[in-house]
Image: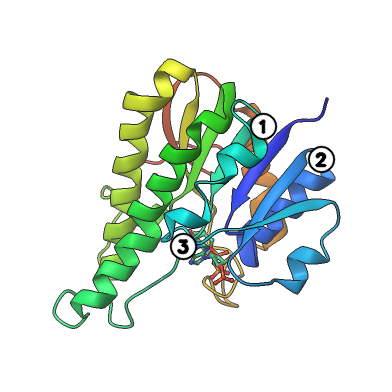
Amino acid sequence: MSKKILIVGASRGIGLGLAKEFASRGWGVVASERTRSDELHGAGEIDIVTVDVTEPDSYLGLKNKFGEGSLDAIIVNAGITGASHQSAEQATDEEIAHVMQTNAYGPARVGKALLPMLKAGGTLAFMSSLMGSIADSSGGYEFYRVSKVSLNMLAKGIAEQQAKERDVEVLSLHPGWVQTDMGGPNAKITVEESCKGLADVVEKAGGAGYRFVNYKGEQIPF
Ligand code: NDP
């Protein structure tokens, strides 16, 4: 029987690329959009659901729809750059709260809520960023960085507290600098290259624990 994956935030960019890549590898793919994405609907044999990571009512029902232990992997990919001013002095409290909700608490809540959908030995991955590495930071993009550091911390917590006993590995993934709406046209790699690498990483993952790795499978320092 083919493996099955849920990709949250797949309307465009890396999420859409991941949905296509896993489908091309013969995986059963469930992918989410917030509002209708013609690209996702035209991407082939993909089961499409509607999820907003900041709205628990939009995803809590998925556990019943697909059943416990029905998935081999979940990737929570949704993310935003967020505050128009990325410095602590200029961004508004509302902007900061929105970035944190969308990039950190929202994805972590989705991961915790849907963890029972994973089989033992499955993988729960969060789309982080090299910008979430304190060791690597050169400053700038303050709230985006803080949101991804927080996401990594929350992911490690899920690995220690909830995933271990279910034998689920938790990953924070850095996709590379990718040509998407977020990454912009000058980004170094295509969506296809990033998603091939990320899919390899997820296919090879398994077993309890936590890792922060890039699309080539290389460890990233915290
Ligand atoms: P895009 O802006 O192209 O796509 C973002 C995706 O996230 C869209 O599908 C969007 O849906 C979805 N999304 C945003 N907010 C929500 C929400 N509240 N609930 C559900 N889905 C949501 O970005 P990328 O594809 O470039 O980025 C994907 C992930 O990779 C992000 O987490 C990003 O931080 C990370 N990343 C990207 C890098 C890059 O170079 N591109 C580098 C490092 C990390 P909608 O269409 O409805 O807005």
Q: CA distance from mark 3 to mark 2?
A: 25 Å
Q: CA distance from mark 3 to mark 1?
A: 22 Å
Tell me which numbered mark, 3 or 1, is placed earlier along the sequence.
Answer: 3
Q: Check the image and name the residue furthest to the left.
A: 89
The quarter of the picture where the N terminus appears is: top right
Residue 57, position in %: x, y? 47, 55
Residue 203 image label: 1
Instruction: Please give the name of the residue rendered at 33% of the width and 82% of the height, measured from the top-left corner.
Output: 84
Residue 32 picture quarter = bottom right
**Is disc 2 surrounded by few (<14), some (14 to 19) or many (20+) residues within 10 Å?**
few
Residue 63, position in %: x, y? 57, 38
Give the residue number, with chain letter if any, for mark 3. Answer: 79
Instruction: Tell which of 18 and 183 is nearer to you.
Output: 18
Residue 142 picture quarter = bottom left
Residue 211, position in %: x, y? 43, 32
Which amino acid is tagged 3?
Gly
Tell me which numbered mark, 3 or 2, is placed earlier along the sequence.
Answer: 2
Instruction: Please give the name of the residue rendered at 64% of the width and 53% of the height, measured from the top-left corner.
Output: 194
The quarter of the picture where the C terminus appears is: top left
Q: Are marks 1 and 2 in contact (CB under 8 Å)?
A: yes
**Is disc 3 surrounded by few (<14), some (14 to 19) or many (20+) residues within 10 Å?**
many
Instruction: Tell which of 125 and 28 is nearer to you.
Output: 28
Give the residue number, with chain letter if any, for mark 2. Answer: 25
Instruction: Tell which of 214 and 126 is nearer to you.
Output: 126
Residue 45, position in %: x, y? 85, 51
Residue 114 relative to residue 157: left or right:
right
Q: Is residue 120 among what the camera can see? A: yes
Q: Is mark 3 within 8 Å of ligand 1?
A: yes
Which amino acid is tagged 1?
Glu
Q: Are marks 3 and 2 in contact (CB under 8 Å)?
A: no
